[in-house]
Amino acid sequence: MLLNPAGNRIRLALLLVTLALLSPVAAFAQDSTPGPDAPPAATKCSDGKLRVGDLQFLDAEWTKQREYLNARAVEWEPDAFLTRLRVNCGILEPGFRWRGTFYSPSQQAFFETDSGNAFGAEFDPEDAEPLPNELRFGAVWRALIKAGYTDDIPLTPEIGITLQVNSEAMPLGPADVPENATVCHVGLDYFGEIRDLFVTIDDGAVHRHTFG
């Protein structure tokens, strides 16, 4: 059999070109794979921890939960309306835990949907401010990302996510939070420092208490 040196050289050149083209693809795939030390992304409480990135999923979840919480409150008192909402991770099973606090003007009392407890309110019934139906968790998430926080930052279980209208009867946040603004209070475990942040949903402003 006759050897063809020219043909062998052509095949070798084609092989080298192919390897050169494939090498960057393989390197990119290797570099883009998260390593074992990469920070966790949003998990929807699958590991029992609530994170900044989970806020982007809560609008869809709230649509499902709102009817259930309202039904619980109306069973207690027909005139009850939502004044505070807390979101955290479930204790016994993965997923979000939703806890509503409703106010009844006729009873001048609050009702907690998770525990079923009712307790009195010490202010004029006309001063109670209801939360809007659309709470816009996505707007809170965008405000935190814009402020420099990342999806993997955990939220403290003691605070989690709390929404309420800042009013004279039920204040929430530092003095510079506008009155009657819908406020989202989050506690961030920021590299070992607990940061209490108050986001006004309408304008996306992030407020913090200042001392001294």
Image (cartoon, rainbow, N blue to C red):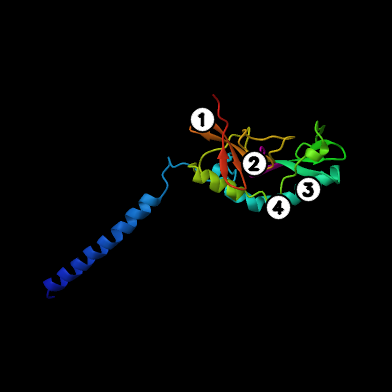
Above or below — where is 9 with respect to 55? Answer: below
The residue lying at 56 percent from left, 34 percent from top is 208
Distance between the alpha carbons at the discs numbered 2 and 3: 20 Å
Q: Is residue 30 left or right of residue 179?
A: left
Identity, as a three-letter code, of the amino acid under mark 3: Asn
Quadrant in which residue 119 is drawn: top right
Quadrant in which residue 187 is drawn: top right
The residue lying at 69 percent from left, 53 percent from top is 63
Q: Earlier in the sequence, mark 4 or mark 3?
A: 4
The magenta segment is: 91-99
Q: Position of residue 101 (x, y in %)?
A: 75, 39
* SS class, disc 2: strand
Q: Identify the image quadrant of the C terminus.
A: top right
Residue at the extreme bottom of the image, as rendered: 2
Q: Is residue 166 left or right of residue 148?
A: right
Pick the front one: 48 or 189: 189
The residue lying at 66 percent from left, 51 percent from top is 61
